[in-house]
Image (cartoon, rainbow, N blue to C red):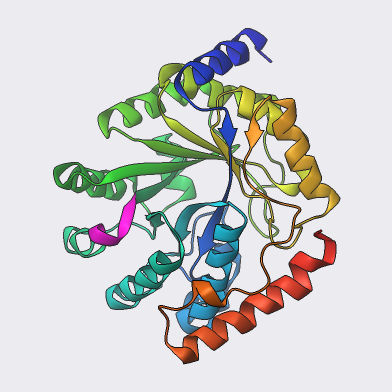
């Protein structure tokens, strides 16, 4: 590992960003995707969900309870995510409006590529849009994401630039890229004036073509190279449960915040404590709560909702609280 690279990235981070660090949770709205053929993706192995989006769409009360937990525990929302064509425009706008009633900040939207009409409709309710680039190498991208050409994301971002809508991308490290591809990523960020990037280390799923994720040092160097090239860029780094010991390295490489941890399922566990310890090792101030129980009575947060939905949100919140959070939390 190039320690000088990591140290340089850390210095640039500290010159341009707060030392505060948050956990960011992606809010999944649906497990459906009309494409469903990305060769690394769990959805590509779930053919029953691909055929019937109704089986994969999450109930509004479940989503809203999860959003409220994020608010009460000082978790940032990484983005609202769902596969291609998992919601109609009206359904999605209604859901985002309800999320905005609970969560204090507008969220990023990661729902595939959107056309101009859709962008106009969503614009008042979102922070910006996320393009799931995944890999910037064009040959790899064509092979791994055959139904999601980069050109579609580029067209969406061209429209976003015209409309002054913020732009974000996701990149997965470990799909076969090399550091020779970094100039392509740099060029893409510059061309589309990307404001935020989420890096993930590949988490291989059963029945896909991948069996191993990237080494932590290699993963961190991608983040460091990005931080050095773009000192003011917002960088989010994902780390899976089996990779938690890399978090302090990812932060020292220049990441602003962390994501991907199973925060509700493992709330208050030794894994959650490890996350906090890793942030401390990187000499960052961890602002999110992964160990102390949130409020039990949430009624005051739900006054904008009709009684029927309010009751369902409370039931779902209590299920999370009693069956997940309270199990290990204090």
Indicate whether 8 appears above or below 47: above
Looking at the rendering, the stretch of residues picked out in magenta corresponds to: 123-128
Which quarter of the figure is the N terminus placed in? top right
Of residue 285 and residue 299, the one placed in the foreground of this image is 299
Of residue 216 and residue 248, the one placed in the foreground of this image is 248
Of residue 76 and residue 237, the one placed in the foreground of this image is 76
In the image, residue 124 lies in the stretch drawn in magenta = yes
Please state if 109 lies on the left or on the right of 46 as rendered.
left
* The image quarter in which residue 9 lies: top right
As drawn, the residue found furthest toward the front would be 300
Indicate whether 178 appears above or below 316: above
Residue drawn where x is 39% and y is 60% of the image: 111
Query: In the image, residue 13 lies at what x, y percent?
Result: 51, 20
Please state if 177 lies on the left or on the right of 4 as rendered.
left
Residue drawn where x is 76% and y is 53% of the image: 291
Please state if 283 lies on the left or on the right of 196 as rendered.
right
Query: In the image, residue 135 lies at what x, y percent?
Result: 47, 39
As drawn, the residue found furthest toward the left would be 162
Query: In the image, residue 214 lies at what x, y percent?
Result: 67, 34
The reply to whether residue 243 is visible in this rendering is: no
Which quarter of the figure is the C terminus placed in? bottom right
Numbered circles on residues, count: 0
Of residue 153 and residue 307, the one placed in the foreground of this image is 307
Residue drawn where x is 52% and y is 61% of the image: 27
Please state if 173 lies on the left or on the right of 82 as rendered.
right
Indicate whether 149 appears above or below 220: below
């Amino acid at each position: 590992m190039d320690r000088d690279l990591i140290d340089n990235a850390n210095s640039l981070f500290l010159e341009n960003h707060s030392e505060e660090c948050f956990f960011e949770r992606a809010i999944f709205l649906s497990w459906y995707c009309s494409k469903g053929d990305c060769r690394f993706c769990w959805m590509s192995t779930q053919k029953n969900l691909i055929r019937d989006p109704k089986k994969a769409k999450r109930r509004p009360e479940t989503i809203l309870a999860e959003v409220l937990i994020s608010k009460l525990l000082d978790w940032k929302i990484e983005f609202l995510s769902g596969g291609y064509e998992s919601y109609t425009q009206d359904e999605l706008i209604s859901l985002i409006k309800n999320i905005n009633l609970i969560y204090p900040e507008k969220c990023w939207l990661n729902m595939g590529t959107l056309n101009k009409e859709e962008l106009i409709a969503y614009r008042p309710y979102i922070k910006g849009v996320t393009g799931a680039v995944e890999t910037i190498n064009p040959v790899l991208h064509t092979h791994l994401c055959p139904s999601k050409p980069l050109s579609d994301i580029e067209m969406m971002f061209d429209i976003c630039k015209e409309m002054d809508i913020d732009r974000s991308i996701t990149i997965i490290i470990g799909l076969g890229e090399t550091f020779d591809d970094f100039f392509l990523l740099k060029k893409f960020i510059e061309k589309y004036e990307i404001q935020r990037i989420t890096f993930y280390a590949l988490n291989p799923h059963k029945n896909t073509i991948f069996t191993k994720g990237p080494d932590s040092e290699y993963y961190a160097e991608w983040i460091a190279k990005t931080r050095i090239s773009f000192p003011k860029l917002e960088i989010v780094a994902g780390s899976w449960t089996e990779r938690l010991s890399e978090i302090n390295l990812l932060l020292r490489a220049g990441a602003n915040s962390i994501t991907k941890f199973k925060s509700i399922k493992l709330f208050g566990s030794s894994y959650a404590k490890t996350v906090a310890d890793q942030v401390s090792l990187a000499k960052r101030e961890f602002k999110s709560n992964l160990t102390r129980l949130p409020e039990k009575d949430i009624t005051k947060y739900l006054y904008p909702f009709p009684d029927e939905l309010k009751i369902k949100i409370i039931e779902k919140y209590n299920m999370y609280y009693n069956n997940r959070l309270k199990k290990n939390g204090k």
